[in-house]
Image: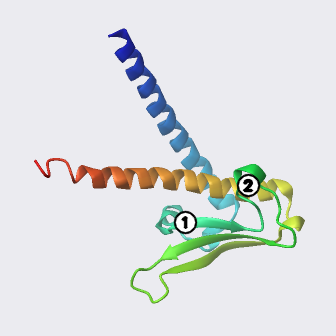
Amino acid sequence: MSSALDRLKNLTNKISSYETARKENLRLLEELFDELEISQKVEKFSDMFLFKAVNLSGVSLQKETLGEIKEGKYLQLLAISYDKEAAQKSKNISLAYYGRADKVDVNFKNKVVEFVIRYRFEKSFMTLEHYHDMLGEFKGKGE
């Protein structure tokens, strides 16, 4: 019995930890949204999540080389929108252009990278919730 109780406590702590991390992530993400002046292209912070994805050019987002500048490239924050009715389904939208990546202040570049990672972190929670809700549709079916 103690083992089951310990597992439940561990699971509860983990869920609580994720929820706390998510709230803090959203708070910091919104701060970066303002600081990086993304509001010039996206009026409301919540509208950021209407995009399918957010990407970055000029700097690596790979775990092994995170934040490394790509030689001769420009630092640009891109959003990918998706319209299933359009002839061309996906479209890249420039959210912010910061110039040559090697000329951008290192701390500022790091904030841009952080923004993308924080956005993806929140988007992954939203995706998880979406599929969880979809699976709920199967409860009671097929019985």
Reading the image, the residue beneath label 2 is: 111
Q: How far is disc 1 from disc 2 in space, using C-alphas? A: 18 Å
Question: Quick check: 42 left or right of 106?
Answer: left
| Callout 1 touching callout 2 (CB < 8 Å) | no
User: Looking at the image, which is closer to me, 17 or 2?
Assistant: 2
Where 117 sits versus 15, above or below? below
Image coordinates of residue 129 in percent, x first then y, are: 38, 51
- Does residue 53 sit above or below 82 in this rendering? above
* Residue 1 appears left or right of 49: left
78 lies left or right of 139: right
Q: Residues within 10 Å of mark 1 (few under 14, many from 20)?
A: some
Question: Quadrant location of residue 2?
Answer: top left
Quadrant that contains the N terminus: top left
Residue at (44% x, 54% y) in the render: 126
Residue at the spot x=87%, y=68% of the render?
71
Tell me the element at label 1: strand
Q: Which of pointers 1 and 2 indicates the residue nearer the eye? A: 1
Q: Where does the image place residue 10, in percent across and percent down from the top left? A: 45, 23
Look at the picture and state if 120 lies above or below 13. below
Residue lying furthest top in this view? 2
Residue under label 1: 53
Q: Which residue lies most toward the right here? A: 103
